[in-house]
Image: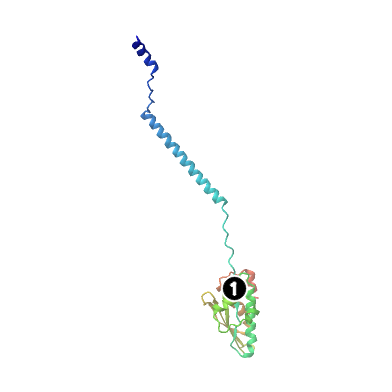
Amino acid sequence: HDLASALQAYPASQSVPSRRAQPTAAGAGVTRLARRRRSVRLALAGLALLVASGVLVARFKPAGRSAGPAAPPRIVVLPFENLGAPEDAYFAAGITDEITSRLANVQGLGVLSHTSAVAYDRRGKTVRQVGSDLGVDYVLEGSVRWERGSAHDSRVRITPQLIRVADDTHVWADRYDRVLADVLAMQSEVAENAVKAMGVTLLPRERTALNE
C-alpha cells in the first residue's frame, strides 16, 4: 500500500524539465536576413551622416584669402648720358625729365621721382645693385646726342634701353634719329614703347597723355 501510494505521488512531485523550442532552419534564415537589413540601414545612415557633415564643413569653411592685385612694376629713369657737346648736358637732362613725366602718367606703373633718380650715384654699380638700392623692377637709361646745324639740319639721336633688374637682361632697346623738331614725338615714343615692353596696358586717356 505504501509502495502504491509512492508510485502515484511521484509524477506529481517530480516535474520533467521542459525543453526550449529549437529554431527551425526557416526561422534562422529570417533572423540572418533581419540582421543584414539592420546592418545595411546602419551603413546607409552613417554614409548619409558623413555626406551631411562634408556639406556643412564646405558651406561654413572660411573662404581662403584671395590674392590681391599684383603690385605695379616700378621703374627708374636714370639720367641719359650726353654724347654731344658739354654745353648740351641740359638738353639730355631735359629729355630724361620729359620721359619720366610721361611715364608717371601711367596708372599701372610706379615711377621713381626724377629728383631721386638724379641724386642717385650709379657709378660702379650693376643693374641689380641699382634695383636693390632704389626698389625698382626696371631701369631705363640711354644716351642723347644733339648734332647742331641750321634750323632745319639739327638732328637729335636718342638711344634708350630698358633693363629688367631680376635677370639683368635687356627687355627693349631702340634708336631714334630725327630732326630737332621731332624731339617731342621721340620722347613720347620712348615712353610708350617702354610701357609696352613691361607688359603694362595703357588706358586711352593715358595713351593720349603720353602723346601730348
Name the residue at the front extreme: 2
Q: Nearer the viewer, residue 80 or 29?
A: 29
The one nearer the camera, 122 or 158, is 122
Residue 27 position within the rendered picture, expressed as x and y whole percent measured from the top left: 39, 29
| Direction from residue 40 to residue 82 in the image, left or right | right
**Image quadrant in which you'd find residue 198:** bottom right
Task: Give the residue at x 57% y 72%.
Answer: 196
> Is residue 140 visible in this depiction of the protein?
yes
Task: Point out residue 205 in the picture as x, y percentages from the top left corner.
Answer: 64, 70
Q: Answer whether residue 193 is visible to the viewer in this image.
A: no
Classify 148 as above or below 39. Answer: below
Can you name the residue that lies furthest to the top here?
1
What residue is drawn where x is 65% and y is 79%? 115
Residue 13: horizontal and vertical position, in percent? 39, 17
Q: Please give the count of numbered marks on the rendered protein.
A: 1
Query: Label 1 belongs to which residue?
Result: 74
Image coloring type: rainbow
Up the image or down, 60 lies above or below 9; here it is: below
| Residue 140 rendering spot, x and y as whole percentages | 58, 78
What residue is rendered at 41% in x and 32% in y? 31
Q: Quadrant of the C terminus?
A: bottom right
> Vertical placement of 198 versus 11: above or below?
below
Work out which quarter of the rendered image holds the N terminus and state it.
top left
- Secondary structure at badge 1 equals strand
Tell me the crowding category of disc 1: few under 14, some 14 to 19, or many 20 or more residues within 10 angstroms, Cα based. Answer: some
For the residue pair 89 and 68, the one nearer the viewer reads as 68
Residue type beneath disc 1 = Arg
Name the one closer to the observer, 123 or 34.
34
